[in-house]
Image (spheres, rainbow, N blue to C red):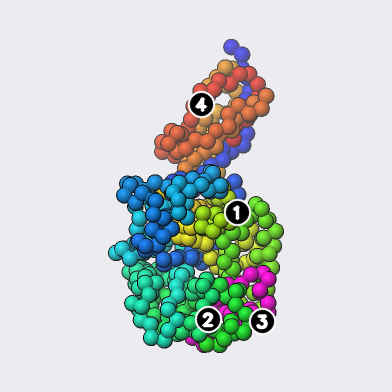
């Protein structure tokens, strides 16, 4: 019988597939995650009442269906939206509509977020602008109160208040709201403090004049840690001085269509840090508000690659933390809250970025080695790696690759300290290497 010498070289490479602990396992990212110990927050909107769902889905949506149908279609990446119902503005819904007034609804979101590694929510709130308001004056305040209470029940989850000025309230309205907020909730354990002060983000501050922002700053910064929401254009030294920290609500940052955005974010972070202030960088999973406002802007989701690209790119700004846009801004399609269209995909991706799984060690090859018979179908055996969930087998022959295949720990036969596979591929004569 003829004998052939097989030169055995290299080490089998083993990788852990990051599953994220949720309902949909993700493929290995094409961009490796850069680790970060910085806190990660998510914008959390308090407007999801039964009425708000109806306002967004419209009168033609089949509310009695179970499970509820998706209200619109898109392409794979979440663009090119087509509504299935006249008057609808949403792309996604849960299997059944849940109001934030329902018992346990907000707490469930908090538990999901905490389990994914999110530090806390930026709770989007405003009051009625009067000096006589109470916890029951507006529904947002009741939900804010429940969010603080639920955070305390869950534990280990601390929030900021994202003060909402989308309707351009007058300065007196803003100051009255912030005074009420402080007086009513200052002792809440679920409201994070920095430098001993509860944290408020003045979301939309970039829309106000320097004089208006200065008036708000003068009124509350003695007892609140005030974070500005500014753009590259509005981030002047004078504006930075009015705040304790800066973020940027950039929900449509596009790493593919606008790669220079990373330099723009870094420029902002550098300016803020040079002034001795904290900087919180934005993240988003994608964006599409076409059904909401007719905008043609769409940032493709790309199965998590957009979120990974923004994490890696904006990390160059050396952020003190992250502001994830968003947990539940469903109308702009920036949400990561698990629902029907995307499932847990984007919460999983964020969790993997927050809590990257360290790569396992290398596996040591044991056999085959040396000279084996021709026309042979060998069993490949290596030492088991305890933290590996999959192994990548490569066999190179005289004419190139013979085998390139992933084997999960289920596919490979692992017993004791070794694993092995026997691919149904017969090797002909020649020199081979396997890794």
Q: CA distance from mark 3 to mark 1?
A: 34 Å
Q: Is 283 situated left or right of 271 in this image?
A: left
Marks 2 & 1, CB-CB < 8 Å contact:
no
Position in image of residue 362 (x %, y %): 55, 44
Answer with mark 4 or mark 2, whichever residue precedes in sequence.
2
Q: CA distance from mark 3 to mark 4?
A: 67 Å
Residue bearing the label numbered 3: 238
Q: Residues within 10 Å of mark 1 (few under 14, many from 20)?
A: few
Checking the image for residue 296, the label placed there is: 1
- As for residue 291 lying within the magenta part, the answer is no
Magenta segment? 220-246
Answer with mark 2 or mark 1, whichever residue precedes in sequence.
2
Quadrant of the frame with the C terminus? top right
Quadrant of the frame with the N terminus? top right
Marks 4 & 2, CB-CB < 8 Å contact:
no
Q: Quadrant of residue 149?
A: bottom left
């Amino acid at each position: 019988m003829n004998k052939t010498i097989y030169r055995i070289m290299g080490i089998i490479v083993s990788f852990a597939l990051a599953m994220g602990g949720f309902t949909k396992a993700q493929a290995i990212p094409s961009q490796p995650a850069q680790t970060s110990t910085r806190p990660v927050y998510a914008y959390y909107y308090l407007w999801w009442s039964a009425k708000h769902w109806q306002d967004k889905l419209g009168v033609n949506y089949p509310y009695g269906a179970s499970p509820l149908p998706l209200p619109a279609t898109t392409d794979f990446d979440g663009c090119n939206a087509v509504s299935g119902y006249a008057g609808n503005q949403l792309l996604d819904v849960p299997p059944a509509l849940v109001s934030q007034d329902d018992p346990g609804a907000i707490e469930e979101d908090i538990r999901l977020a905490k389990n994914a590694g999110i530090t806390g929510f930026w709770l989007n709130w405003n009051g009625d602008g009067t000096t006589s308001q109470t916890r029951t004056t507006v529904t947002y305040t009741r939900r804010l109160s429940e969010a603080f209470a639920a955070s305390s029940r869950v534990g280990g989850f601390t929030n900021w208040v994202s003060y909402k000025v989308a309707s351009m309230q007058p300065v007196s309205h803003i100051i009255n709201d912030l005074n009420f907020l402080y007086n009513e909730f200052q002792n809440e354990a679920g409201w994070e403090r920095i430098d001993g002060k509860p944290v408020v983000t003045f979301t939309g501050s970039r829309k106000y004049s320097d004089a208006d922002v200065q008036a708000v700053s003068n009124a509350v910064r003695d007892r609140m840690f005030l974070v500005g929401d500014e753009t590259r254009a509005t981030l002047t030294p004078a504006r930075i001085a009015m705040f304790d920290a800066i973020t940027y609500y950039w929900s449509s940052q596009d790493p593919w269509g606008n790669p220079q955005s990373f330099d723009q974010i870094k420029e902002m972070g550098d300016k803020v840090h040079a002034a001795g202030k904290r900087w919180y960088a934005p993240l988003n999973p994608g964006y599409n508000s076409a059904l909401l406002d007719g905008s043609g802007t769409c940032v493709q989701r790309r199965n998590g690659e957009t979120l990974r690209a923004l994490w890696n790119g904006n990390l160059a700004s050396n952020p003190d933390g992250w502001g994830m846009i968003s947990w539940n801004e469903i109308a702009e399609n920036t949400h990561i809250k698990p629902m029907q269209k995307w499932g847990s995909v984007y919460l999983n991706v964020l969790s993997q970025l927050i809590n990257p799984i360290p790569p396992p060690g290398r596996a040591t090859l044991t056999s085959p080695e040396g000279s084996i018979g021709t026309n042979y179908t060998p069993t490949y055996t290596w030492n088991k790696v305890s933290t590996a969930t999959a192994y990548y087998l490569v066999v190179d022959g005289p004419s190139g690759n013979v085998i390139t295949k992933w084997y999960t720990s289920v596919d490979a036969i692992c017993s004791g300290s070794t694993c092995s596979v026997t691919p149904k591929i017969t090797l002909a004569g020649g020199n081979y290497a396997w890794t």
